[in-house]
Image: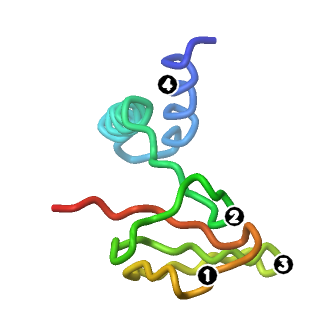
Amino acid sequence: MTRREEIEAAAKDIFKDSEYPVPNIYSFIRGAEWADRNPSPEWHKFTDSDCKPEKGQVIILAIINMEFKIVSYELVRYDPMIHYSGNDNVRWLAVPEL
């Protein structure tokens, strides 16, 4: 099955009971194709020594707690003097400049 066929099958299954299946299926397919062309940026680990944000850079922190299956997000300016985490439960993603 091709990627296009997978997307179409998923769309038809999700919207099989929808009052408006055609526009919903079309929108789902367009959205999935856009997501394939524009993959999400990679979340970085603070334990990766080769990839650190620059001082003052605005980043999103994701704090992951697998025990409770939750993630909290914070928007911060990176300060290398602050210890964010010594394990892999904290990830960061750069916020692009406008």
**Of pointers 4 and 2, the one earlier in the residue sequence:** 4
Spatial CA span between label 3 and label 1? 19 Å
Q: Residue 24: horizontal and vertical position, in percent?
A: 36, 41
What type is the residue that disc 3 sits on? Glu
**Of pointers 2 and 1, the one earlier in the residue sequence:** 2
- Whether 12 is drawn above or below 60: the answer is above
At numbered mark 2, what does the secondary structure look like: helix, strand or loop? loop
Label 3 close to label 2 by CB (< 8 Å): no
Which of the numbered marks, if any, corresponds to residue 8? Answer: 4
Query: Quick one: 64 or 45, which is closer to the camera?
Result: 45
Label 4 close to label 3 by CB (< 8 Å): no
Q: Residue 15: horizontal and vertical position, in percent?
A: 49, 41
User: In the visual, does 58 lie left or right of 92?
Assistant: left
User: In the visual, does 23 lie left or right of 60?
Assistant: left
Mark 4 vs mark 2: in front: 2
Q: Badge 2 is on which residue?
A: 47
What type is the residue that disc 4 sits on? Glu
Mark 4 vs mark 1: in front: 1
Which of the numbered marks, if any, corresponds to residue 84? Answer: 1
Quadrant in which residue 95 is drawn: bottom left
At numbered mark 1, what does the secondary structure look like: helix, strand or loop? loop
Residue found at the very far bottom of the displayed protein:
82
CA neighbours of label 2 inside 10 A, class few (<14), some (14 to 19), many (20+): some
Q: Residue 40: horizontal and vertical position, in percent?
A: 45, 46
Spatial CA span between label 3 and label 2? 21 Å
Label 3 close to label 1 by CB (< 8 Å): no
- Whether 86 is drawn above or below 47: the answer is below
Query: Quick one: 32 or 68, which is closer to the camera?
Result: 68
